Amino acid sequence: MPGKHVRFQDIPQTPEPESPRSPSTPTQYYIHAALSPLRAQGVQCDLSLPSKYRSLQSQLPPNVLAESATSPPLPCMTITCRGLPWAVRVAPSGHSKQGPFVTVNDVLDALRRAMRVIVTKAEFDQVKAVDAQRRIEDAYRRRSQKINDEQERSSGIRRVDFLMGRTTFAGLFSSGHDAESWELSVS
C-alpha cells in the first residue's frame, strides 16, 4: 500500500529472565586401564600371595603406578568386595601439582595390605553360616599349602581367606553409590 509507513518505537531492551539452572549432570568417573575389569593393560595377580612372593606393583612401570586411579582424579576411594565384611579405604600417599589424589599404586598397596590383615576370632565368629566358616578355613589351608611357609601357616586366617579361593584380582568397577565407592572383582 503506497504511502503507509511502519514505525518502530525504541524500547529499551529488558534482560531476558535467567533460565533456571538445570541440575548439573553428575560427573562420570572412569577407572584406570590397569585396574579395569576389561584390563587390556591390567594387573594379573593372586591376592592370596604375600608381597614377598609376587608384588602387584612389579608388573607396571613407575609412570603408570603414579597415575590417577580414576579419571577425573579422586581424593579418596572406598573399595568393597562381595564376601568381605570390610571395606578398604584408599587415601593418597603423596601430593601432586593437581592436589592429592589416589594413584594406581595407592589402590594396589591398599588392597595388598588389607588382604594381609589377620582375622580375629570375634571377626571369624561374625560369620554365622557353618558352611561359610568351613569354606574360609579350607581357603586358609589351601593358601598355606600353596605358600608352604611355616610363618604364614602359623599366622592364621587372613581377610583374603574370606574370598574362599576366589583370589585373582579381576579389576575394579563403580559400585554406583557415589564417585568414591568402587567394587573389587575377583575370580
Image: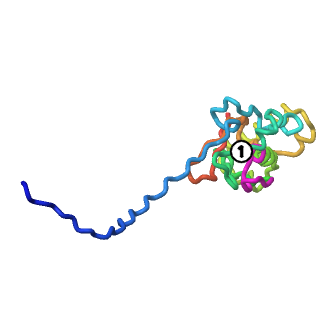
87 lies above or below 135: below
Q: Can residue 159 be seen in this view?
A: no
Question: Chief secondary structure of the magenta span?
Answer: loop
Examine the structure image and report whether residue 131 is included in the region drawn in magenta.
no
Q: Which image quadrant is residue 184 in?
A: top right
Viewer-proximal residue, 97 or 84? Answer: 97
Residue at left offset 27%, top offset 68%: 10
Residue closer to the observer: 176 or 168: 176
Find residue 62 and report its image quarter: top right
Residue 31 locus on image (x, y percent): 64, 42
Q: Quadrant of the C terminus?
A: top right
| Between 48 and 162, the one nearer to me in the picture | 48
Read off the residue under disc 1: 133
Residue 89 image offset from top left, x and y in percent: 72, 54
| Numbered range of the magenta stretch | 94-107
The vertical placement of 175 against 48, above or below, is below
- Residue at left offset 84%, top offset 31%: 146
Vertical placement of residue 130 versus 8, above or below:
above
**Quadrant where the N terminus lies?**
bottom left
Name the residue furthest left: 1
Residue at left offset 40%, top offset 63%: 20
Q: Residue furthest front?
A: 3
**Amino acid at dot 1:** Gln
Residue 5 visible in rendering:
yes
